[in-house]
Image (cartoon, rainbow, N blue to C red):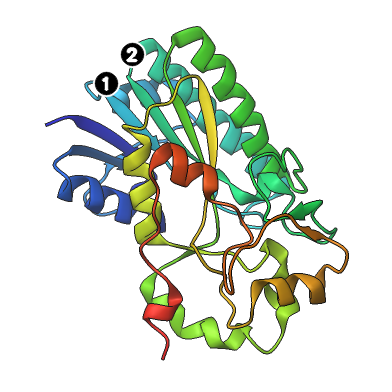
Amino acid sequence: MERICVTGAAGKAGRAVVADLREHGYDVVATDLAGPGVLAADLTDHGQAVEVLEGCSAVVHLANIPAPGMATPAVTFQRNVTMNANVFLAAATLKLRRVVWASSETTLGLPFDDAPRYAPVDEAHYPVPTSTYALSKVVTETTAEHVAAWSGIPFVALRLSNIHLPEDYANVPSYWADAASRRWNLWGYVDVRDVAQSCRLGLTAEVTGAESFVIAAADTIMNRPSADLLREEFPGVELTHDVGEFGTLLSIDKARKVLGYDPQHSWRDHVG
């Protein structure tokens, strides 16, 4: 079995990714700062990053402070950039065949206090960091480009939307009365099981260099037509193509085409 290291393995996405990879026949080294069944490692230390990747052929790197506001802005930036650089440089030193890692939808301008230039927002709506968290991801995407060029290793950045577990969907109806409550990311979300799918596909997709992909659900989290939401909250923002009645306003077209990403899960499967 091919051995894959998953960092951030005790987190929301990490647990799903580890389970999915094992279900698909991979041998997984699961690492995090702490947690049941994980190899404890602090990836802000380069030596520990090398050690956890040793013997693996690829890495799915999810370990980071996962959102703004969980630590001070400076700490968020410093820890994330340091962890990411250490993992990327360790991968290059060890000549891994692939790096898949968690970037963020925030690199595209979220939260949208200012209107997006157009919708659906795609990979070209970048870089628009509005927090040190988002900036840490932009810096890391730039780092990935250069390390990929030096090493020849393909790097796959997944600009993940707001991750939902199945149990989170019970709260979805509470969003519907106020469209403004979720306008911050154009009413986007992604099921954790589809995050796991995207990580697995990223390990084998035919990519070279460093590529980035928006990863979201196929629909919005609202029960109203997407075009109506956009007109109400962002009047004047052009809808560049028909997205269907409830289609996502975070474009997943590139992920569909290049990765073969096909989101299988929706809040609609859980809310009556």
Q: Residue at 34% across / 51% down in the picture?
A: 196
User: Does 63 sit left or right of 85 as displayed?
Assistant: left
Q: Residue lying at the far front in this picture: please name it.
A: 242
Q: Residue at 55% across / 61% down in the picture?
A: 162
Identify residue for label 2.
Answer: 94
Image location of residue 122, percent across then percent down:
65, 47
Image location of residue 131, percent across then percent down:
74, 48
**Image: 47 above or below 162:** above
Q: Quadrant of residue 80?
A: top right
Image location of residue 192, percent across then percent down:
39, 60
* Residue closer to the observer: 212 or 137: 212
Q: Residue lying at the far top in this picture: please name it.
A: 150
Q: Residues within 10 Å of mark 2 (few under 14, many from 20)?
A: some
Q: Residue at 75% across / 70% down in the picture?
A: 230
Between the C-alphas of marks 2 and 1, the distance is: 7 Å
Is mark 2 in CB contact (under 8 Å) with mark 1?
yes
Q: As shown in the figure, which amino acid type bears the numbered disc 2?
A: Leu
Q: As shown in the figure, which amino acid type bears the numbered disc 1?
A: Glu
Q: Residue at 58% across / 37% down in the picture?
A: 79
Q: Is residue 34 visible?
A: no
Which of pointers 2 and 1 lies earlier in the amino acid sequence? Answer: 1
Q: Label 2's element? A: helix
Identify residue for label 1.
Answer: 54
Q: Label 1's element? A: loop
Q: Is residue 152 visible?
A: yes
Q: Which label was assigned to residue 89?
A: none
Image location of residue 166, percent across then percent down:
37, 73
Q: Residues within 10 Å of mark 1 (few under 14, many from 20)?
A: some
Name the image quarter holding the C terminus: bottom left
User: Does 54 sit left or right of 112 as displayed?
Assistant: left
Q: Quadrant of residue 191?
A: bottom left
